[in-house]
Amino acid sequence: MSAGFQRARRPEQIEARRTAILAAARELLAERPVADISLRELACRVGLAKSNVLRYFDSREAIFLEVLDAAWTAWLDDLEGLLGDPAPADPGFAREERVAGKIAVTLGERRLLCELISSMAPVLERNISLEFARSFKGRAAASTERLGVLVRTRVPELSADGARQFALGVVVLVSGAWPLANPTDVVAKAAAEVGATPEFADGLAEGLTNLLAGLVARRR
């Protein structure tokens, strides 16, 4: 902890301290997986004691969930432009394949987002307060709804409920596919020996295409 530490009291001071902590968390996530980052290491990176970090966030897990929320919002902002304008339906399910493929490719380019999504339910949501859980889940639900709307705008045959199911399916598929595609060194070596090394973006695109096409087909 820096010798000149003073507790932030004014709103702008508190926000500046929170911003610094989140920036430190992102820096560490660029270096190693979330599971390998301790609260002590994060506190040292930002120049505070652990107890002082916890003045601004509920827990280590809450910090990384805030990073996830910001990364998810940034992805949706970019995705809206990348999906382009709505277009007439193509023969078969080519349009669904195109939309699902763009989602998969953009997620594959965002390691931080995918890692935090895959860690959300099993790790990061295990040590947070009820108040923070309400806030985070409310924001997560809004982001999921936004993704559903983006997809339904491009695939209008999809029902509102189907759009929500698809958006939730994106989270579920990323949660499972990312760890499989990014195993430990030992598991990666063993998988390579038997020819079982999954490619994240391609596998995700296939799964999302099947999900989206299936939801549309059920509506027809």
Image (cartoon, rainbow, N blue to C red):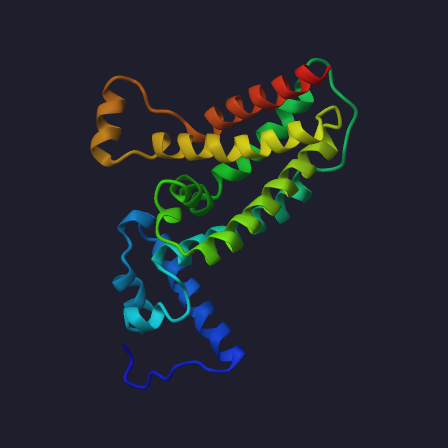
Residue at image x 47%, y 30%?
173
The quarter of the picture where residue 24 lies is bottom left
Task: Please give left or right for residue 18 compared with residue 148 in the image.
Answer: left
Which of the two residues, 198 or 17, is positioned nearer the viewer here? 17
Residue at image x 23%, y 29%?
187
Q: Residue furthest right?
A: 88
Image quadrant for the N terminus? bottom left
Number of marks: 0
Up-down: is 86 above or below 140?
Answer: above
Which of the two residues, 111 or 65, is positioned nearer the viewer here? 65
Q: At which x and y percent is residue 110?
A: 48, 44
Which of the two residues, 34 or 65, is positioned nearer the viewer here? 65
Image quadrant for the C terminus? top right
The quarter of the picture where residue 91 lies is top right
Up-down: is 170 above or below 18?
Answer: above
Residue at image x 40%, y 66%?
21
Q: At which x and y percent is residue 180?
A: 35, 30
Which of the two residues, 20 or 82, is positioned nearer the viewer here? 20
